[in-house]
Image (cartoon, helix red, strand yellow):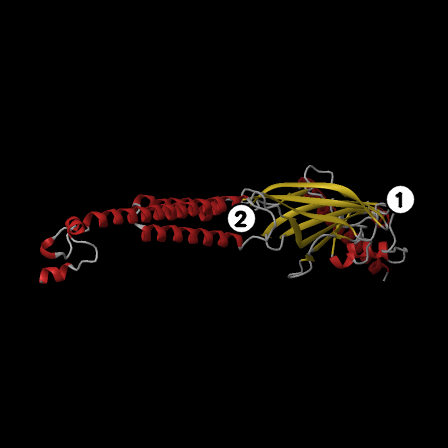
Amino acid sequence: MKWTTIVTSWLITVIRAVIDHDYNSLEDDTMEISHSSEHLYKPMRFRNCTRDTDVIDRLLNGTGYNKFRIPQDEGMTVYVEIWIQAITSIDELTNDFEMDIYITEKWLDPALNFERLSPCKGNLSLNHQVLDRLWTPNSCFVNSKVAQIHDSPFRSVFLMLFPNGTVMVNYRVRVKGPCSLELSNFPLDLQTCGLIYESFNYNNQEVRMRWSAIDEPVQPMAAIVLPDFDLFKISANRKEEPYPAGMWDELHVIIMFERRFIWYFMQAYLPTYLTIFISWVSFALGPRAIPARTMLGVNALLAMIFQFGNIMRNLPRVSYIKAIDVWMLVSMTFIFCSLLELAIVGYKVRDESKVANKAASKRSKPLVDGSPRGTSLYEKRFMFPPGCNTSRSVTK
């Protein structure tokens, strides 16, 4: 019995030694792989480390953490960064634009510091449901028409927690925002659209909204391609806006678009050129081809009006004159002047025809009438007294 106990103890000691040797070898290999890779995560530790779920439970359960209380008495500073995934449309009739973006927010919550817990990972990537248990700045686009987080196939919210308590939240959002359309130079115009991002519940004494300290806090992820516009400029700035409850920090995103005018050149400018030239063809038909010249002028004017209406139906009704309005009105004036010239020429030709007809009728009127024996009018006047019936005299 004694020998059995000794042998059993010896075997257990040997097995533990083998396991510890294999474990240390595995840990060394893991450390080498982690150091050779360039990433943000710290080397994984398998011994005496705390799992993600245990870290969250220790931070949030039984510690008095309250998601409705601001973590720092002096206020929170939230850093924001926006990546534009795609701009899908710009509607000039409704004065808005639509795009898909990634919004990243970062803030420091000292109550979520887990360095003392020896986590297995350097950074914790958590489910979006955990975000509902944390304090958030409750920020939103205050001037958007529609804004929603993508939820197909699941809610597009990414949450990462750093050991020092830094919280990083990333949302994938589809937002429709307003545009201040200025069409005075249409179609050679620049259009400006903008969004305002701020904390809805906290003024700047409680939450300070700031852009991330990078060169371009708002930037596209890829080239933005639109059928009617080119992306001209993106700018980001911060303003303080007064409200009845205090001053709020507003993060402004201003996006400028430059219109592509080739379509309008092909559909408006070039056809009006040709229409005006066609109306001038009537000048070569001569002053007496009134029906043909009238048909050319009227058809050219109708074609111009149709082209103008086809362009204007895709634009909002504004009370000021646009550049294309001036162009179309001047083009119509050219065609109208050609019709006016036709009317003046026709009137002159008709008067000249009347004068010519009168002169011709005078020249062609006979000097001999039905007097006896072909007596001329001159002879009749002096040979026969007034009231004399020449026909009876001849008969007698």
**68 or 210: which is nearer to us?**
210
Rendering coords of residue 153 (x, y %)? 64, 61
The picture places residue 40, in percent across and down from the top left corner, at 71, 43
- Residue 28 visible in image: yes
Instruction: Answer with left or right where residue 7 lies relative to residue 310.
Output: right
Disc on the earlier residue, 2 or 1: 1
**Distance between the alpha carbons at the discs numbered 2 and 1:** 48 Å
Looking at this view, is 57 or 370 the one in front? Answer: 370
Residue type at mark 2: give it: Asp
Q: Is residue 319 left or right of residue 46?
A: left
Q: Is residue 327 left or right of residue 285?
A: right
Name the residue: 64% across, 61% down: 152
> Between residues 22 and 215, which one lies in front from this camera angle?
215
Crowd rating for badge 1 (residues with CA inside 10 Å; few <14, some 14–19, many 20+): few
Q: Are marks 2 and 1 in contact (CB under 8 Å)?
A: no
Judging depth in this view, the residue of 214 and 23 nearest the camera is 214
Marks 2 and 1: which is nearer the front? 2
Mark 1 lies on residue: 74
Residue 288 visible from this viewpoint: no
SS for dot 2: loop
Residue receiving disc 2: 228
